[in-house]
Image (cartoon, rainbow, N blue to C red):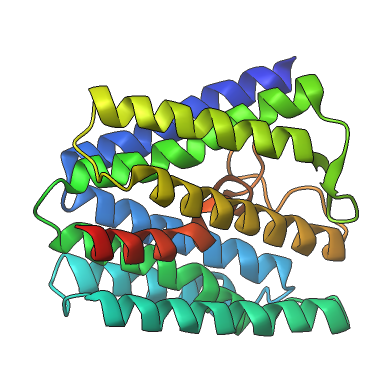
Amino acid sequence: MANLSLRIIFGLLYVVIIVASTFLGTPYFELLMALSVFFSVKEMAQLSQNKTIQYIWYIPLLLCFSIILFTVFGAQKLDLSKLIFIWIIQMISLFVSYTSLRKRSKINNVSTSIYLFLPLMALAIWFNQSQTNSFEYLLLYFITIWIYDSMAYLVGKKFGKRPVFPKVSPKKTIEGTIGGIILTIIIIFLIKRHLLDIPENVVLISLVVIFFGIFGDFVESYMKRKLSIKDSGNLIPGHGGILDRMDSIYLSVLPYLILISLFR
């Protein structure tokens, strides 16, 4: 019960921090992404057993400050072609990391750090350069992730019987996944109709975010299973590490930004 209370309290705090930074705008959201990159890469270095000061501090700090440099002090505009290129690099990095894990049960720290850094960097730059409805668009993205996670958990807990990938994540069920998707789309449609000024293609956009969010969740579950660990860290009480909390975000951000660039 104590762990559940911690999970609820720090889960709400996590949501409040993201919503507040989004609402306050520049430079608060960009600084939050910079800090997220720092802790993500630092945590990954610890999981990859690269515990030297170079991997634990220097590289995370360098990537953190690079986001501040690219946003607060200006950066080249991210158009559709650049977003697609960044996404391709991220997927190549993911493939290299997966190959290393599958063959040697060891994390490739370089490729995995790139995989974590690129989407948060792109999101920070996009937010910094967007002038129209940036708050609404970001809120749509995060709400989609959060609602799906909640709905899939509730439906899965009540009706879930058949795991999607038993060897990777036995608690994620087909019933929870399908129920979570349906309920999320309904809720997002109602939000679009009554609350937020967001794209007409919101159902398609939400489906893409959910699909890649699920993909990111399974990627982290696979990593933890190969490393024989339960949580990626202990930064967030009740949730584990920042990788545990943001696993759905790393892989869904770039497809979302690409779609937004197409439909805006």
Identify the residue at image location x=63%, y=66%. 44
Q: x, y (%) of residue 124?
A: 28, 61
Q: Residue at x 54, y 22 (%)?
A: 9
- Front one among 232 and 62: 232
Q: Quadrant of the C terminus?
A: bottom left
Residue 36: x %, y % from top left:
44, 56
Q: Between residue 154 and residue 119, name the one nearer to us.
A: 154
In the image, what residue occupies the spot 72% across and 73% down?
48
Do we see residue 92 in this rendering? yes
Looking at the rendering, which quadrant does residue 19 occupy? top left
Q: Residue furthest left?
A: 131
Q: How many marks?
A: 0
Instruction: Say whether residue 61 is visible.
Output: no
The residue most toward the top is: 1
- In the shown orientation, is residue 155 left or right of residue 85? right
User: Where residue 89 sits in the image (x, y, percent)?
Assistant: 48, 84
On screen, residue 227 versus residue 54, left or right, reads right
* Nearer the observer, 168 or 128: 168
Q: Quadrant of the N terminus?
A: top right
Q: Residue at x 42, y 73 (%)?
A: 118
Above or below, comparing residue 114 to residue 159 in the picture: below
- Residue 71 in the figure: left or right of residue 167: left
The x, y position of residue 213, in whole percent, is: 56, 52
